[in-house]
Each structure stands twice: as C-alpha cells, then as structure tokens.
Image (tube, rainbow, N blue to C red):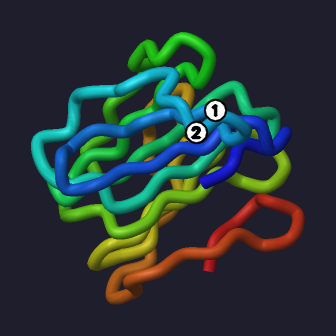
Amino acid sequence: AFSPCGQRLATGGEDRAVILWDARTGKAELVLQGHASMVRSVSFSADGARLASGGWDGTIRVWDAATGALLRAIPNGSLVMGVQFSPTDGRTLASAGYSAKQWDVDSGEMIRSIEGRDFAVFSPDGRTIA
C-alpha cells in the first residue's frame, strides 16, 4: 500500500513482518514485528499517520506510521485477509476474512459485522461497510 503522499510504501508477507519503504529510493525504513503468521494486508489511514496490518494470525495491528510503534492490536476472531481504513478518517477500519467487520480503531470495539462475507468496502462517505 502506498501512503497518501506517495512517498512511502508498506508491504507484508510470509515473514510475518510489515516493512515500510522509501518509495523513491527503495530502502527499508522500518520493520514492524508482531504478527504470529503471514501478513496478508496493509492500509494507510487517509492522513498517513497510521498503518493497519491484518494477518492470518487473526489480528489487526495498528501502527504509528512515523515511528513504527504498535498503537493497538485488535483480535479479529478469524484470519484477516484484508484491512482498509475509511477514506475519510483514521479512526474507522474495515477487515475481511470469514466475515466483514467495521472497527473503531481508538477503542478497538467492533462497530458492525456482516457474516459470510470475505471482503469489505466502505461507502463513499466512510460511515459504513458493505
């Protein structure tokens, strides 16, 4: 995932790490550790301040994109195949696995769950998922 400014790139993979890269030079800036299994998805918040990662370990991790500090670990309840921040703020996140879920990032509380869906997208206003 590219940061909103386009200057950074975040990747995840089988090594269980999230790596933040300088998009211009291709050099790794930060390596974020914490997932117990493959990292399947990464997403920057609209302001670029936060980075979310989702893994097959069933967790969503929210990181400070500048420092790499772990801000919150959210148990998803099943593997996470995708994460996406709301297009309008850095406080709401969608995850997808065996169900689509919407999260309040600051509290870690689930806002909504749609069972039997393996992907999630935000409405254009960023208020709900489908």
Q: Position of residue 54 (x, y in %)?
A: 36, 52
Residue sitting at 78 percent across and 73 percent down? 123
Residue sitting at 56 percent across and 40 percent down? 104
Given contact means CB atoms under 8 Å apart, are the residues at marks 2 and 1 in contact?
yes
Q: Position of residue 72 (x, y in %)?
A: 40, 25
Secondary structure type for disc 2:
loop
Image quadrant in which you'd find residue 71: top left
Residue linked to disc 2: 26
50 sits to left or right of 24: left
**Label 1 packing within 10 angstroms: few (<14), some (14-19), many (20+):** some
Q: Amino acid at mark 2?
A: Gly
Residue linked to disc 1: 22
Residue sitting at 58 percent across and 58 percent down? 84
The residue sitting at the bottom extreme is: 116
Q: Amino acid at mark 1?
A: Asp
- Mark yes or no: residue 91 visible: no
